[in-house]
Amino acid sequence: MAAMSSHDPVFDTSFHPRLLHPRWWGSWLALGLLCLLALVPHGLRDRLANRLAPTLLRISKKQAYIAETNLKICFPELDEAGRQALLLKSIRVGLKTFMGFAELTLRSAAHLASRVKVRGWEHIEAERAAGRPVILVVPHTWAVDMIGRYFAIRGLTMCTMMKSPKDQVFDWYINRERAKGGKVYERSVGIKPAIKAIRSGASFFYLPDQDHGREASIFVPFFGHPKATLPALPKLVKLTGARAVPILACYDEEEGCYRLEIEPPFDPYPGADLVADVCAMNGMVEQQLRQHPEQYMWFLKIFETMEHQQGSDGFYEEGIKRIRGDLPPGE
């Protein structure tokens, strides 16, 4: 778990000697390579990603299974060849954004801003002029980390919540970079610190597509399938007076740049019906992903919690057990 500051429950960006333990030397090597790639022209990085993507897809059997399962649900009109083509394109986009992540460390604010093209910035300016913070409704696309840095460059104070990855070196590094765009709270500390920050004028990252389990969720349609969805966005808007603004972060393969697609705020929001409000949120995310399906992290277990679940296993577990050899093919 990420270290928290003692006076404010934000991610502690200071370096700790435990990160030099030999078990993390491989992570430091990977991080060094990532930093070297940030200095390579993006066109060369992208060509390297094009070459590596088919191999990465072939060896990532568990992630490929989860992604293909999601695509079968969300795009039933696609045949196997269509799903594989979309999945390969998504892996390609993911590699290109990952290989460029260290630009956030090594490149200037002016350079980063020049790499981003934005549609809909007038919606953000309207809220700033009204003196209101915004809650950015941000699906898990590969380029999502560019949003926080770009908004910080444009003068917005940001805050977000995260769940620490298992790798302590990358946990420290990634969240140190995210903290340059604003406050980063560990998800385990709860929502109250973020509410306080929003009320103080900070804008907030809200990730609408995570599965937080049955007890915290309600089931509403997502691509025509019941999905366990956290119904917190309407409550956050009501508690803070912020406006909920949908935004999609993309990596444009043709132009070799990032794109932020900003939609008008949900309005009126919230309404009298909580389920309708949550459906509107899911509907917007679905609309965005239908337009740019290759941008999404399809390997996430977005349908893990089943509406009518039997037993303790989640939606994907049987298939994952088969891949690992824990179950015979026909069982």
Image (spheres, rainbow, N blue to C red):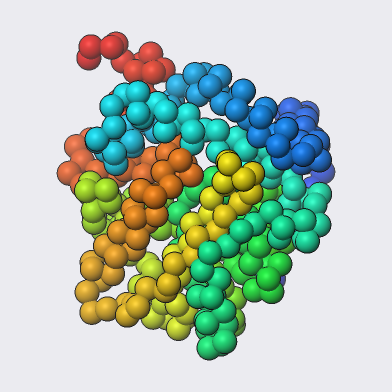
The quadrant holding residue 256 is top right
- Above-or-below relation of 104 to 165: below
Q: Please name whichever residue, 91 or 208, is drawn nearer the observer in this view of the structure.
A: 91
Looking at the figure, which quarter contains the C terminus?
top left
Q: How many marks?
A: 0
Residue 216 versus residue 226 in the image, above or below: below
Identity of the residue drawn at 75% across and 48% down: 103
Q: Residue at x 53, y 64 (%)?
A: 119
Q: Quadrant of residue 72?
A: top left
Pinpoint residue 250: horizontal percent, then vertical percent. Answer: 53, 50
- Which x, y percent locates residue 212? 38, 52
Residues 168 and 329: in front is 329
Which percent across, then down, holds residue 202?
59, 76
Residue 116 lies left or right of residue 193; in this view the side is right
Asked if 281 appears above or below 326 in the picture, the reply is: below
Q: Position of residue 100 (x, y in %)?
A: 69, 42
Residue at image location 57% in from the left, 55% down from the top: 259
Visible residue check, residue 61 = yes
Residue 264 left/right relative to 103: left
Most distant residue in the bottom direction: 130
Q: Is residue 169 left or right of residue 9?
A: right
Determine the residue located farthest toward the front in the rendered image.
254
Residue drawn where x is 58% and y is 41% of the image: 254
Q: Is residue 313 above or below residue 276?
A: above
Would you say residue 1 is visible in this rendering?
A: no
Closer to the camera, 105 or 12?
105
230 vs 48, nearest the viewer: 48
